[in-house]
Image (cartoon, grey):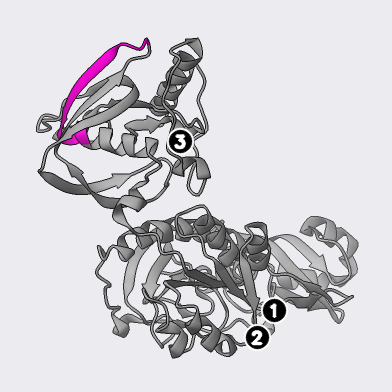
Amino acid sequence: MSKLEILTEPNPTLHEKCKKVKFFDDKLKKLAHDMGKTLLDNNIYIGLAAPQIGKSIRLIVIEYDPRRVLPEEEWEKCKEKPIPLTYLVNPKITWCSPEKESGNEGCLSLPDIEIPVERHKEVNVIAQDLNGNKIKIRAKGFFAKIIQHEIDHLEGILITDRANIKPSRIIFAGTPQFSATILERIIKSPYKPYLVVTEPDKPTGRGRKLEENPVKIAAQKAGIEIWQTKSIRQLAEKIKNLNPDLLIVAAYGQIIPKDILIAPKFGCVNVHPSLLPQYRGAAPIHAAILNGDAITGVTIMKMDEKIDHGPILSQIEFPLNHQYDTPTLSDVLAHLGGNLLVNTLSLYLLKEIKPQKQNHNLATFTKLIQKDDGRIKWNENPIAIERKIRAYKNWPGAYTALNGKKLKIHQAHIDNGKLIIDRVQLEGKNEMDFSEFQRGYRKNIDFLNKIC
């Protein structure tokens, strides 16, 4: 038996109506057993349908033990009976109870999404086993929900279809790699944008060649239409005429004007890399590192006219240690934010989330980083200098001057309260270990003594 790869939305196979199984041969049995192994290897998941592993046939596998999903102290109270590994071929619901109930459901093909779905409390099902023998099942409670969920897959129906939360006109606005990571995540979700707004290509390097930003590159790979502008205000009328359902903003780099904020049916949602109301503004990741915070995180908020001022939809915390610099922390928070966004949108669009007003009295603000912010003042506390080196990694870089040239400090650490420099780069030279640099610049002993 082998573990199979599970398809995720928006793969078209997940939306196909599956074909009836006609041959009950070894090929079918092997596929079923591989599906069973795949299901069990995912530990807490309880059902798998053939289209989820790329086979558009009417076959489902179910296995459920409440002890794997409930805390140990709740085992004795649980009235649900375990469901042994069960293979159902060509299953069909022949009767449904009129009574229904709503409960949260997740899906392997929709990672990070959990939404309320209404199901019948009881169902009768006819099916066949792997040998073609007829099976009759009367399913109640949780078992009934599982069967209905998996048979939905055979009809090309996902939980997002049941909940009717697939807005088709989503716009995404962002520019740097943080934004691109989030865009790549939602492209793989039910909320793939049909339009991306981003800043213009910028000249870089000695040749001043125009370079495409990460969001534009990600949008091009996904075949999404791209609008680039120096001022989003210039697009206000065009965006309003599109009658968008939702605008998602992540590190776009421009203030969104009111006439755009009110244009989408569901408003505008922002992904912000801090635990608002802390660190509003342009540089929350830098601020968390500079201040030596033990915890940071991501906030999903509904935007209003003020910067990072709108009500909170959801938040997630992340423990922060001295190993993170701005690029690595930005990457972590972008992945966390992308997953949180997808899960939050599911509930937000169903009006299952009540936006929570921020405590504006606790708000703190960050400023736009300037080139001179990276200049090291050697009379500062060594811990503050080390944090600056990590916070300003890549840009503007932490630096000092040596004989009229810029010396970048790429990496350092603290040992018994003393700053230990690890990696440096002199203007016009390659990056190197500080020990190697010391050997080559012994004549600058006074300078070296100052920074060691």
Point out the stretch of residues depicted in magenta: 131-144
Callout 2 secondary element? loop
Mark 1 or mark 3: whose residue is earlier in sequence: 3
One can see residue 307 in this view: yes
Q: Name the residue under label 2.
A: 230
Q: Which of marks 3 and 2 is in front?
A: 3
Mark 3 residue type: Gln
**Disc ID at residue 126:** none
Residue at horizontal 89 percent and vertical 70 percent from the top? 428
**Nearer to us in this view, 7 or 404:** 7
Left or right of 37? Residue 325 is right
Q: Is residue 87 magenta?
A: no
Residue at horizontal 61 percent and vertical 64 percent from the top? 224
The residues bearing labels 3 and 2 have C-alpha atoms spaced at a distance of 43 Å
Mark 2 residue type: Lys
Q: Mark 3 points at which residue?
A: 52
The residues bearing labels 1 and 3 have C-alpha atoms spaced at a distance of 39 Å
Left or right of 192? Residue 62 is left
Callout 1 secondary element? loop
Q: Does the magenta stretch include residue 141?
A: yes
Q: Mark 1 points at which residue?
A: 200
Mark 1 or mark 2: whose residue is earlier in sequence: 1
Q: Where's residue 80, x and y in %?
A: 15, 30
The residues bearing labels 1 and 2 have C-alpha atoms spaced at a distance of 6 Å
Residue at horizontal 61 percent and vertical 87 percent from the top? 231
Decide: marks 1, 2 in contact (CB < 8 A)? yes
Q: Which of marks 1 and 3 is in front?
A: 3
**Nearer to us in this view, 435 or 35:** 35
Mark 3 or mark 2: whose residue is earlier in sequence: 3
Mark 1 residue type: Pro
Callout 3 secondary element? helix
